[in-house]
Amino acid sequence: MNWALLDTWIVLAGALCAMSCALLGNFLVLRKMSMMGDAISHAVLPGLAIAFLLTGSRASLPMFIGAALVGVLTAVFTEWVRSFGHVEESASMGVVFTALFAAGLVLIVRAADHVDLDPGCVLYGAIEMTPLDVVSVMGRWVPRAVITLSIVLLVNVAFVALFYKELKISSFDPGLATTLGISSRVMHYLLMTFVAITTVASFEAVGSILVVAMLIVPGAAAHLLTDRMGYMLILSMIIGAASAVLGHIAAVVVPGWFGYSDTNTAGMMAVMVGLFFGVVLLFAPRHGILSKVGHQAALRLRIAREDILGLLYRQEEVYGTSSAASIDFGRLRLATGTGPLLGRLALLDLKRRGDVLTAGPGYTVTEKGRHGARDLVRSHRLWESYLHESLGLDPDHVHSSADRIEHYTAESMRKEIASSLKETERDPHGEEIPGGGKNE
Amino acid sequence: MTGLFHRNLFSLRSALVPAIAAAIVLCMLPETAQAVSAGLARSDIQVPAWDQVLRVLSLRDYNTRVVVLGTMLLGLAAGLVGSFMLLHKQSLLGDALSHATLPGIGLAFIFGAMAGGSGKSLAWMLIGAVVTGTLGIGFILLVMHYSRLKQDTALGIVLSVFFGAGVAILGIIQKMQTGHAAGLESFIYGKTASMRSQDAWLIAITAAIVAVGCVALLKEFLLICFDQGFARAQGWPVVWMEIVLMTMVTAVTVVGLQAVGLILIVALLIIPPAAARFWTNRLVPMLLISAGIGACSSAVGAGISAVVPNLPSGAMIVIVAAVLFLVSMVFAPARGVLIRSIERVQLNRRISHQHLLRAMYEHAELASGEAGPAAHNAPVPFQKLLRARSWSAKELRRALRAAESEGLLERRGDRAYVLTEQGLADAARLTRNHRLWELYLIHFADVAPSHVDRDAEEVEHILGHDMVEHLERLLPEEARTDRPGKVPASPHLPVADDFANGEGVVRGVSQ
């Protein structure tokens, strides 16, 4: 594609909008009010229409004021329906914004007799047209939308910087905020006011759908990437801006792959931020799906490994270190209760570590493996003794608990249990607790 | 109770502030007055001729008949499934779902065009809508269950990203050589007025399936809406029941897309159930009322837009539904705002009445210097009563007037009051209830005598006769009094003659 000044302005408008929305959106995500952005952006329609009917022009200021007022009123009405009607919050939001949207549609259709006010334009915006509407700033022609969105971004940054502490506390702990003298209600309406202003200022340029996407998705992605509020704000703005840039490129390039010409930039920016979110959802270091699944799998593998070692060790206790102590794979699986795949993997891993040996048809434990297994069995039997002695559980009830907790018991814990026990030689079933004297 | 009432009043006041501010700003706008009149003059609505109204009402036109009946059935089906969504606290799922259908519609159009047709095969587009709608729901569940993000964020992400994708795909279609995308817009805003009989049949079949499904699975849906844990413990296939419910919601949403558009179908899923909830606390009546409101608002809305030219029917349907919601919210007898505030005011009146009588009694008791019914009944000055509790002068005056008109007190001289015979008996009974509860708290809940007054205040107003008898049986000998009129001594009130300056000598029952 050929990059022109036009593209720069489009991308700049998109990125400015994305950053102002993302900044506020973080707080919506944290306050579990993500759908408020959607509600407000739909509900401003009647505000636009009324402002138009009143003034008879498409001048920006009255439209802006009308829409912003109705945006704030959406939050107020939702709160009324919720508190006076005892309607659940999301339902009251749904009632309010759909009703307002419908009223706006009717008004717009009435108004459309006289002048072109297209609801489609409100929804998708016309970001491609932004470079055409220019004003002169210090002798240079700059798109009006870029100016407006820069101001909005500055105002939003100032708002968040000024009320950072209050926003943070009232988002995480409204009760604490109230005891500290910060009214969460005032913060709620302040935030809603700024969301409404941002929504209205943005959607003339980029359309409400991009506003909703940029309000929620960058914040959600940043929330998965970090646990710190400051980083979350910065990350969300970076994600928003990056998806604006990539979204515009994709809007021009991607349809070409399928033999079509370009497509709607705002829509593509929303898709791009969605892709960002998908990637983060999968690969985020701590809260991503893969890392969670990976940790779980690693844990299951370790437990399977330890169970096998423990079984081989107990077998040796009975049969001595002869070939009679060898156990084949089927019995290993049966006795430890692991699945076929997990069992195989665990055995492979054990062999790689040099903990078990293939002996005839089955497996035996090596000297190195025996050492680890002794610790495990010691943990198990110490726990059984502890549960029996200190908690008064019957000997035939202690096994399953000990079987689970043995995998999470370190040397220091073993020492502590042993020191609190009277009987450290034998467990409640009469089996010897290994390594008692030698380890101390 | 009173605290709750005040809080609500307060929230009303603080919520009014922005509304008033909005009105003021609106009035301060230049030339608002002329503009209003000009705007109104411009947006003239043609008043329809009577015979035209009659034609619509009697469904004489084939077209009107299809539209009104079709939307009515749609409203009915949406009202039914929406009720379960509301009880399930998933009202906005329909919103995300309906937005998520757009890319499917667009893709189906493109594939249809590539396959050589005009692309506008309704069946394929509906299938496309179902596919991406289902994908959207799947993604919501994925985000909700496998990340730290909550339901609202998951809904918002799916809604905006899928809709964005849909808009991008529509953008491609608009620039395609083959076919033209004019019809696709109707999925966003609806095209009720041009509903054909095949659309109406589709809606009718869907509505019938949904209605049968709701009746057949009523008990199961009830269970998963109210107590999933119990349902699971009882061995119900909760996941499958959820899937059936989601399928029905998807079906209603997709067939509704055509009729009222993807934003307003959300309204039909949310508003009628929310309105029905005000009328009843029972599930089956709620389902019926919700379906009724849905059907009614659809028929009326579609009717209005058929009669009056240039009113979009989808929007009119939603406006009628919203009006019904408002009426229900204010006037409904079960949970309406009006009935609840009347009940609250009545309760508050009763409470301050009882407080007044007890304050009079305690004053008389202190004045007489010993527990039990006062021997002499000294008049209590208004100011003293005002200091006895944290009530406003207005509240106290109202309670005094009410008690006076019931013949429980008499006015003596300049704003001083005495209890009548009847008033004394009532006051003694109320005070006795209060103190019995205090004694109960001291003996059985180990609450310090200085702390029981507040707790007893919250309970005394709802102590029934049975409960009082029960308390009498439970309490120890010293506290118990066999004669109903005899009042036990207060465990915390001072014996001194002025309770404002009293030292608070605790004269508790034996510990």
Image: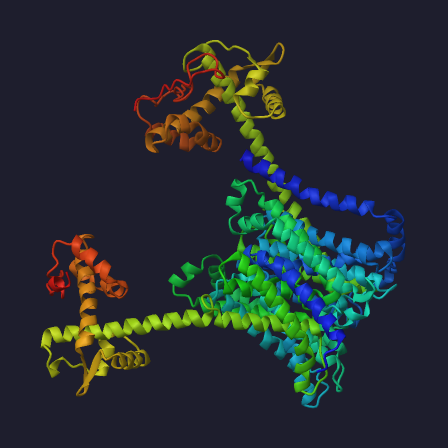
**Residue B119 appears in the figure:** yes
Q: In the rendered image, which quarter contains the C terminus of chain A?
A: bottom left
Compared to residue A383, the image places residue B62 above or below, namely below
Q: Nearer the viewer, residue B472 or B44?
A: B44
Q: Position of residue B313 (x, y in %)?
A: 76, 64
Q: Residue at x 21, y 60 (%)?
A: A414
Q: Nearer the viewer, residue B412 or A287?
A: A287
Q: Residue furthest bottom?
A: B116
Find residue B61 and report its image quarter.
bottom right
Q: Nearer the viewer, residue A82 or B287?
A: A82
Compared to residue A422, the image places residue B499 above or below, namely above
Q: Residue at x 65, y 49 (%)?
A: A190
Snapshot colouring:
rainbow
**Residue B163 appears in the figure:** no
Q: Position of residue B329 (x, y in %)?
A: 64, 48
Compared to residue B70, the image places residue B325 above or below, namely above
Compared to residue A58, the image places residue A8 above or below, namely below
Q: Residue at x 53, y 73 (%)?
A: A279
Find residue B157 and report its image quarter.
bottom right
Position of B32 compared to B9: left or right? right
Q: In the rendered image, which quarter contains the N terminus of chain A?
A: bottom right
Q: Count the marks: how many?
A: 0
Position of B131 compared to A209: left or right? left
Q: Residue furthest front?
A: A139
Q: Position of residue A436 (x, y in %)?
A: 13, 62
Q: Position of residue B42 (x, y in %)?
A: 89, 57
